Amino acid sequence: MRRFWKSVLVVLVLLLAAGLGFFFFVLPGRVEQAMNGVLNPPPYAASDRAKALHETLTIADLHADPLLWGRDLLVRGTRGQVDIPRLDEGNVALQVFAVVSKSPRGQNIEHNDGSTDNITLLAIGQRWPISAIFSLKQRALYQAARLNDMAARSDGHFVVIRSKRDLRRFLDRRKVESGLVAGLLAIEGAQVLEGDPANVDALFDAGFRMMSPAHFFDSEMGGSAHGVDKGGLTDKGREMVRRMEEKGMILDLAHASSATIEDALAISTRPVVISHTGVKGTCDNNRNLSDDQLKALAAKGG
């Protein structure tokens, strides 16, 4: 009888190990494949004229979030759309790596609150540090550390840009060296500040050079185009903008509510960007920009 129960225990342990293996190693990859697919899979065809033009360009892509998915981006991936080898093959000089810290369940472009979070399970599934499971700020710092580690292991082929000087040096190198890619760290949603604008300093020190006041829900810094109240910058949000400008960080108004865009343009003393968006003239919804917003952005040099 004792031998029987030992056998049962072994089977249960094996089943548990198999379940944990699926949860930690297989499931995150399947989630990424499901969420980052394309309507028309490769290979893609381009004309010789288009290929020739493409090779002459210095290309910067202002938004992608592969850091969320736990892959080693120095290795060519079999899922997702972005990693260093594919950026090099695609002649992308600079990739902005956006960090996602929180994502509401049932996320949509019309109305979300911040009471739920999809990233917690993803963080557990990918064995993020305990601190990053319970803190949005630590989630951002963890993802930044991963990108900086990849740069350190790349033998100089991948560099993280922290200053204008870094960018100039990289572009000069790229004129004479092949296989070089640069990255810039950005944050989607100032909920990572955890209510304290002073945390801008820690994020800057970690390498972040761009941040938006809100992502898919209203934050303590400002309203989201997809939030509940869709308000403007709060007093803390205005302090955040001031601290970012002192540090030389770029204010990104992607996902911001109309009121937040208006407030930010009114108080900013430096050009701002909207890193990824559409226009209402093409698709009229909460996510996209009006002609007046585009003109106001351009008037600030953004």
Image: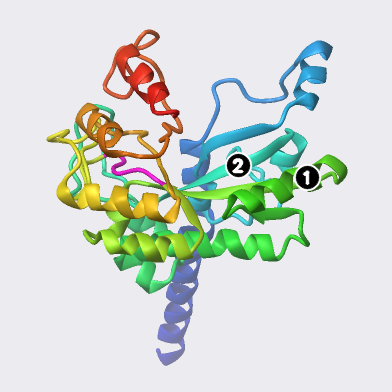
Determine whether, in the image, residue 82 is placed left or right of residue 47.
left
Give the label, 1 or 2, closer to the camera. Answer: 1
Residue at left offset 30%, top offset 32%: 265
Mark 1 / mark 2, whichever is N-terminal: 2
Residue at left offset 38%, top offset 64%: 201
> How did the renderer colour the structure?
rainbow
Which quadrant: the C terminus?
top left
Residue 143 lies in the magenta stretch:
no
Q: Residue 199: horizontal and vertical position, in percent?
A: 32, 63
Residue farthest front in this picture? 269
Residue type (three-letter) at the residue carrying disc 2: Gln
Q: Residue 101: horizontal and vertical position, in percent?
A: 36, 53
How many neighbours does mark 1 have within 10 angstroms: few (below 14), some (14-19), or many (20 or more)? few
* Residue beneath disc 2: 95
Q: Which residues are magenta?
A: 211-216
Residue farthest top in this picture? 281
Residue at left offset 41%, top offset 25%: 277
Label 1 element class: helix
* Residue beneath disc 1: 172
Marks 1/2: CA–CA distance: 17 Å
Residue type (three-letter) at the residue carrying disc 1: Asp
Residue 215 lies in the magenta stretch:
yes
